[in-house]
Amino acid sequence: MKRAVGAAAVGNITEWFDFGVYAYLATTIEENFFPPDNQTLAQIGVFAGFAVSFLVRPLGGLFFGPLGDRIGRTKVLSITVIMMAIGTFLLGFIPPYSAIGIWAPILLVLCRVIQGFSTGGEYAGAMTFIAEYSPDKRRGFFGSFLECGTFIGYALGATVATVIPLISSPEFASTWAWRIPFFIALPLGIVGVYLRVKLEETPAFQTLLDESESREGTEVKQAIKMMFVNYWPAMLTAGGIVVAWNITNYMLTSYMPTFLEKNVTDTGGKAIDTTTSEVLQIVILWVAVLVIPLLGNVSDKVGRKPLMMTGAIGLVVLAFPMIYVLTLGSVPLVAVGLAVMAILLILFSATSPSTLPALFPTEIRYGGLSISFNIFVSAFAGTTSLIMTALVPTTGWAYWPAVYLIFGGLVGLAVLVKLKDPAGKPLPGSNPAVSTPEEARELVRTGADARG
C-alpha cells in the first residue's frame, strides 16, 4: 500500500511541479517568450500557454483512460509520467523571443500540449490506482496522499522558482537560472516510471484479468458509448465536484500570485512585494501538505460528503470576504485571505480522490473518470487564470475571482446534495477490501449473520 501511494503520488508531484514553476515564473516567461512592446497581450499569452494544456487534456483522457481499462493501470501511468516530465524538460531549452521570434511562443505551446495530453491520463489514473489498492475503511486517508503529491509538487516548484533567482547573479538569473526548475522535472519523471513499473496491477483490475486469460478489455468505442449512455449521471456528478474543487485549486495556485502582484497594494500605496506574496503562499502550501491526510482520515470516520459540503458552502459565503481581505494589502490580512481559500480547497482535496473513483465500476473506472474529469477541468477550471487575467484588468474590478469562486461553490452544492456518501463501502464492481485480519473476520462474521 505504501509503495502504491508513493508511485501514484510521484506522478502528481511531477505534474504539479511543472504548474508551480510555470505559475511562479509567469512574468519571466512573459519577458522571454513574447514580444516586449505589448505587456497585456504578453500576459494573456502566458496564461493562454497555461490554458492550452487543458484544451488537450480531454483528448488525453479519451486516449489514455479507455487504454488503462484495457491494458492495465500501471502500464499507462508509466507512459503518462515520463511524457509529462519530457514536456517540462524541453520547455527549459526553448530560446527566447529575441533569438527566434514567433517560434518562441509556438514551441512553448507545443511543450504545453505534450504536458496536457499526458496529464489527461495521469491524474484520473492515479486516483483510480490508489482507490483500487486501498481498503474500504481507509480509502479516504490513502487517497488524500495523492493530493499531498499535488501540494508537494506545486510547493517544490514554487520554492525552486523563487529561490534560484534570489541566489543567482543578475546575469545568470536572466539567462539560465530560471530554466533550471524545468530541467529538474526529468529526474522526477524517471523516478516515477521506476516506482510504477515495479508494482503489480491493482487488486480490482487483477480480478477482471483473472476472469479470462484472453481478456482484451472493452473496445474503446464501446466503452466511450457505455459511459455517455449508461453513466452520464455519474459523469455529471464527477464534473460538478471537479468544478468546485479545481476552480478553487487553480484560483489559489495559479492566479493568486499574479493577482497579488498586479492588483494589490500595501498600506503605503506600493505593490505587494513579489517575494513576500510568494513566500506566504509557499508556507500555506506546505502546511496544507500536513493537514490533508488528517482530513482524509476524518472523512473515513464521518464521511466525504460533510467535508465537501462545508467546502462548497464556504466558497459561496466567504468568496467576497476573502478577496476583500486580500485587496486591503496588509501582509497579515493577505496571509489570512490565502489561508481561508486554502482551507476550503483542501476540504475537497482530501476527499475527492476517494469519492470520484467510487462513481464508476471497475471495467470503465479509468476511462469514465479520465473523460469526465478532464472535460470539466478543461472547460471551467484550467481556464481560471486566463479568464481572470482578461476580466480583472479590462474591467478594473478586482472581485471577479469572488464571482467565479461562488459559481464553483454553487455547482458543487448542486451535485453534492444528491451524492450517496461512499465512505467505508466497496468500490462498484469490486469485492470488499480490508486492511487487517480483524476486519476480514468481522466481514465474514457480518456476512454470515446477514445470510441468517
Image (cartoon, rainbow, N blue to C red):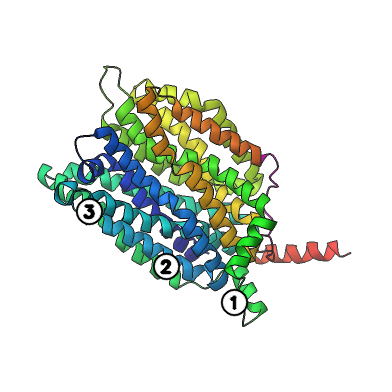
Q: Do the residues labelled 3 and 1 touch (CB within 8 Å)?
A: no
Q: In this view, does 140 lie above or below 77?
A: above
**Which sits earlier in the primary sequence, circle 2 or circle 3?**
2
Residue depth check, mark 2 versus mark 3: number of the one nearer the observer: 2
Specify the farthest residue to the front.
102
The image's mark for residue 216 is 1
Residue 241: % across, % down: 58, 44
What is the crowding at mark 3: few (fewer than 14 residues within 10 Å), some, or many (at least 20)? some
Task: Locate the C terminus by quadrant.
Answer: bottom right
Q: Quadrant of residue 87?
A: bottom left
The disc labelled 3 sits on which kind of residue?
Ile
Residue depth check, mark 1 versus mark 2: number of the one nearer the observer: 1
Residue 370: % across, % down: 54, 57
Which residues are the magenta region? Answer: 416-429
Q: In this view, does 236 lie above or below 63?
A: above
Query: Is 348 on the left-hand or right-hand side of 148?
Result: right
Q: Residue at label 2?
A: 79
What is the crowding at mark 2: few (fewer than 14 residues within 10 Å), some, or many (at least 20)? some
The image's mark for residue 180 is 3
